[in-house]
Image: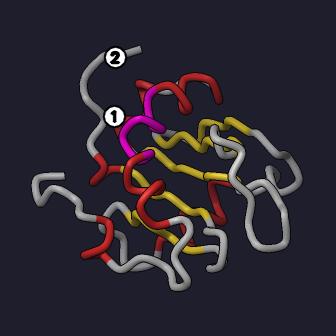
Amino acid sequence: MSSAPLPLSRIIWATRGRHWGFRFLLDAGLADPMATYDRVFAGLIDSPTAFHRDGTSAAIRFLDPEGRRDAARRIIPHEFIVLDDSAETIGSVEDGERVIWPLVSGIYSRTWDAEEPPSREDLELDPKD
């Protein structure tokens, strides 16, 4: 496993908030992240946690580390796809939580309880990411 920083620009992140439904908060610059999501997460639909490597991509799903729930009281899952060489940093669900969660936890804490899904501006991403 490489210890190089993981750029947010190489990550697809799908989740939901307390009041807003499933959304891609990060799209790795793809016009259609759903196509990649469907391909990489195929067969992992019913698992609350999951790790799968698909070529040079890694799919990771884990439940919200702080136990946050949506308005229907379901624990919120976070689903990530790490693309290309950046995926080498992830080899398990635990790696995903350890490496990816610190990169996005502040973003999520600011936006999960909003009535509407966050905009790009709400995410306050660094332009170099």
Q: Secondary structure at mark 1?
A: helix
* Disc 2: CA contacts within 10 A as few (<14), some (14-19) or many (>=20): few
What is the x, y in percent for residue 93?
65, 29
Q: Which residue is mark 1?
A: 85
In the image, residue 119 sits, relative to residue 38, either above or below, namely: below
> Are the two marked residues, 1 and 2, in contact with CB atoms closer than 8 angstroms?
yes
Query: Of the numbered discs in the image, which one, if any, rests on residue 34?
Result: none
Which amino acid type corresponds to the residue marked 2 in the rendered image? Ser
Q: How is the image coloured?
A: secondary structure
What are the residue bounds of the magenta stretch? 99-105
Residue 10 inside the magenta-drawn segment: no
Q: Nearer the viewer, mark 1 or mark 2?
A: 2
What is the x, y in percent for residue 12?
45, 58
Q: Main secondary structure of the magenta part?
A: helix
Which amino acid type corresponds to the residue marked 1 in the rendered image? Asp
In the image, residue 97 sits, relative to residue 39, either above or below, namely: above
Q: Which residue is mark 2?
A: 2
The span from disc 1 to disc 2 (Cα, nearest Å) is: 9 Å
- Residue shown at the point (50%, 25%) measured from the top left: 98
- Residue shown at the point (69%, 52%) measured from the top left: 68
Rendering quarter of residue 31: bottom left
In the image, residue 88 sits, relative to residue 10, either above or below, namely: above
* Earlier sequence position, callout 1 versus callout 2: 2
What is the x, y in percent for residue 58?
54, 40
- Residue shown at the point (30%, 35%) measured from the top left: 6
